[in-house]
Image (spheres, rainbow, N blue to C red):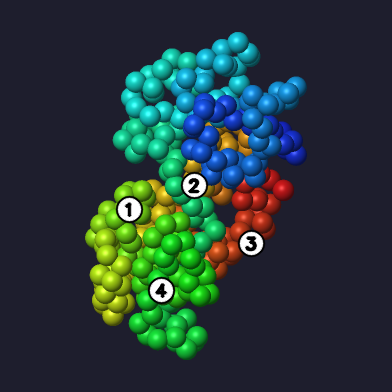
Amino acid sequence: MRGAAAAAPAGERRVLALLAAPGTTTRAVALLGLLGEHADIVSWHRRGDVEPHAVVATSIASLSVLRSIPPVPTAVWVQHHEQIDEAIAAGVTLLLTARPELVARGAVLVPPVGIDIDRWPAVAPLVRARWRERMGLPASYVVRVEGGVEPEGGERALMVASAAVVSGPATLLALALGTPVVTSVDTARRLGLRPGRDAEVQGNADAALKVAEAIAVDAPRAAALSRRARRCAEHHLDLRRPARIVAERLGLVGSSLGPEHLVERRLRELGLPVSSPTWRRVDAALAGLGVDRQGSLT
């Protein structure tokens, strides 16, 4: 595979083309939403006279279209080991996959259902308890999110809940916030959640509520589920990390491998959300040194 592409010159916005095979576009939508922060996204087949700087292909079969043009940095989704071999032979820049077992072969994991972790701070049970007290809420406060309907107060309710019975899309937010979660069998399967570790799983709504109520009054259990929920979101459901890797490897942004990147990596290892006071103090210190978060001198 080719290495990282040359980064875009300062101030230049690059063009990224999506080369999608029929029925595969959805696997790229969420990732492209984040890549759109750095590049203009166009369809390969409808690009007109636009010459893209890089390509994201949704399948190995699509790569044959690129053989007749000058090569540009290319990322492609792979589904099994044989496709990795094909992609390497084709000289692609980056492998993308939804299969965790392919990460060992160098593919970047892009969760089929994911969330931008950087947008949501983890809220520890002790902090939740203090917020509930200030808001006049019960010490044991269980939130139910069913059928895609948000609880009263929306995300704020999930931030202060002792535990939540939640399924569907809102489960991603609950996990990112570190909310102790009781979810459905179907949602656990779709998100790849481990029952009893990342979340509790129940097939019956009444049983799920009873489990959530038990968690709400069991501080050690709630704390353990909170930590594991956030860790699951960070390691298996985060879209920001793969988007950052794709942007750098395809040359859409500059590589952030300087000292400021190492500081950021250490802060992430500590599990500190980007909205925390520590992050703000680090940003202020880096700004004083003339370095921005993207790793360039100001």
Label 3 vs label 2: CA separation? Answer: 26 Å
Q: Earlier in the sequence, mark 4 or mark 3?
A: 4
Label 1 vs label 3: CA separation? Answer: 44 Å
Give the residue type that dot 1 points to.
Asp
Within-10-Å neighbours for mark 4: few <14, some 14–19, many 20+: many
Q: Quadrant of residue 84?
A: top left
Disc ID at residue 143 = 4
Give the residue type that dot 3 points to.
Ala
Q: Which residue has dot 1 on it?
A: 186
Q: Quadrant of residue 70?
A: top right
> Which mark's residue is nearer the viewer, 1 or 3?
1
Disc ID at residue 208 = none
Label 4 vs label 3: CA separation? Answer: 37 Å
- Secondary element at image label 1: helix
Q: Which residue has dot 2 on it?
A: 239
Name the residue: 37% across, 70% down: 164
Give the residue type that dot 2 points to.
Leu
- Secondary element at image label 3: helix
Between residue 70 and residue 294, name the one nearer to us. Answer: 70
Q: Earlier in the sequence, mark 3 or mark 2?
A: 2
Tell me if residue 255 can be seen. no
